[in-house]
Amino acid sequence: MPSASVSIRANIDRPISVVELFTIGIGPSSSHTVGPMRAARAFAGSMADRDVAHVTVTLHGSLALTGRGHATDVAVLVGLSGWEPEKIDPDMIAGLVAAIRETRSLDLDGVLPIVFDPDADLIFDYGFLPGHPNGLTFVADFADGSQETRRYYSIGGGAIIENGQEVSRANVELPFPFSSGERMLELCAAQDCSIADLERANEAAWRSPAETDAFLDSVREAMCASIRRGIATDGILPGGLKVPRRAKGLHDKLVERGPRSDPSAVFDWVSLWALAVNEENAGGGRVVTAPTNGAAGVIPAVLRYYETFVHGATRDGSRDLLLTASAIGSLYKKRASISAAEMGCQGEVGVACSMAAAGLAAALGGTPPQVENAAEIGMEHNLGLTCDPIGGLVQIPCIERNTMGAIKAINAAYLALHGDGSHVVSLDAVIETMRQTGEDMRSKYKETSQGGLAVNVVEC
């Protein structure tokens, strides 16, 4: 598989806001569901006022190989119909897609009726494009016989880029820009402030502090809501693996057991919260990309741990946790990638673990060097983690992997807090190691379902 071109990656100096790291969408995948839906919506919006007679869509590479398991085909149909992942009610998707398949037609951008047969007009191309493993090509045929082609790439975390364009540099000037962990720590030392304070000052370039707080609170609430829905829902997850939801049953057992001094209860609750979110994601429900859907349960579980088990936890502490996690996540986006099709699962659960570890360490009062150390520990012990979902579904091993990521993050935070922040391996070094490892990893271990558990476990 060809490596991603430089233009696809985020410019290392491009400002990245917290609103880019945490977006509210639907499951089961940010790169394979949310991104393709946004690409299809962008294409449809550019064509709705033109005399389009027919549309063909081709999914390339990883989007084709695991597209059906990740509901990429469904996402494209929904996006072509004019819906965005933030606005669509997950409960209406099945009916919308069924109608398109039955009538072999759809309303482009919700306004222009066109013939569209998903069986013929949605093509799965298992070859990889040179730009990125996750490619989509849209071809519009016009009534006058002319044709126009547009290509998009889903580059991770729900972000998309149109072919031939670099990831745009936001038109803002940050007061404290940083593109490395080293520079981040230098700025914190110079300003005598925390990483969260630094991030908050930078967010003020986009919006008022009150608006940033409101956004952080909305992210927190969305994370809590996904936990609540996951805990309240049982049954079998869709997709054919017949994986049962476990969060509700585990929750009922924990409630029945009642308060206990047994330390294992903490692990059980953290695992429950991560399970709940990722079962909700696997079922196509509403989750927060944090920084991706496949890793959506790690940060919510660690956030709930902080609010539930840490004496003196505050709302400001929760905000600091999210702001610090965002600062760390931005470094991975700038210096490597959060796309499992490029990095394997080290780029998803590994990055989420690193972000959560840093966020928790910050909320617990850690110094910037301790927080940076926590982020480094969180990734160091996820290096080489492959993405090998059975059946292309974000279920096995993805759901349980989030519970492991959350527990590792908590462990990493406390390990860092027991030190003074000095350590041998820097965060920058571990991010570069992750990038190199992802480049060296064979494509069959990077969200193609062609290796690992995906081929060594017989599907039921």
Image (spheres, helix red, strand yellow):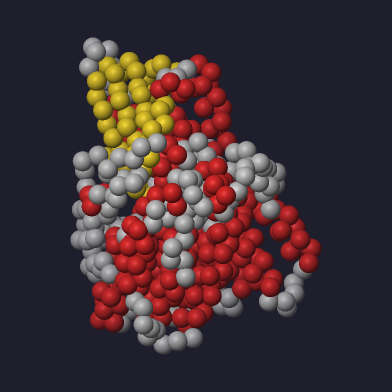
Residue 385 locus on image (x, y percent): 47, 61
124 in relation to 13, above or below: above
Q: At 74% across and 64% down in the image, what residue appears? A: 254
Judge from the rendering whether residue 38 lies leftward or rightward of residue 174; answer left or right: right
Residue 249, picture quadrant: bottom right
Say which residue appears at 61% left-offset and 73% top-offset: 309
Return the x and y of residue 135 as percentages of the image width and height. 34, 39
Identify the residue shown where x is 36% and y is 78%: 425
> What is the quadrant of residue 368 in the picture?
bottom left
**Residue 237 in sight:** no
Res 111 quadrant in image: top left
Residue 305 visible in the shown view: yes
Drawn side of residue 190 relative to residue 455, left or right: left
Which residue is rendered at x = 67% and y = 49% of the image?
245
Q: Could you tell whether 89 is left or right of 209 in the image?
A: right
Query: Residue 322, percent across and down?
Result: 44, 65
The picture places residue 348, in percent across and down from the top left corner, at 44, 57
Q: Residue furthest right?
A: 256
Residue at the top extreme of this rendering: 144
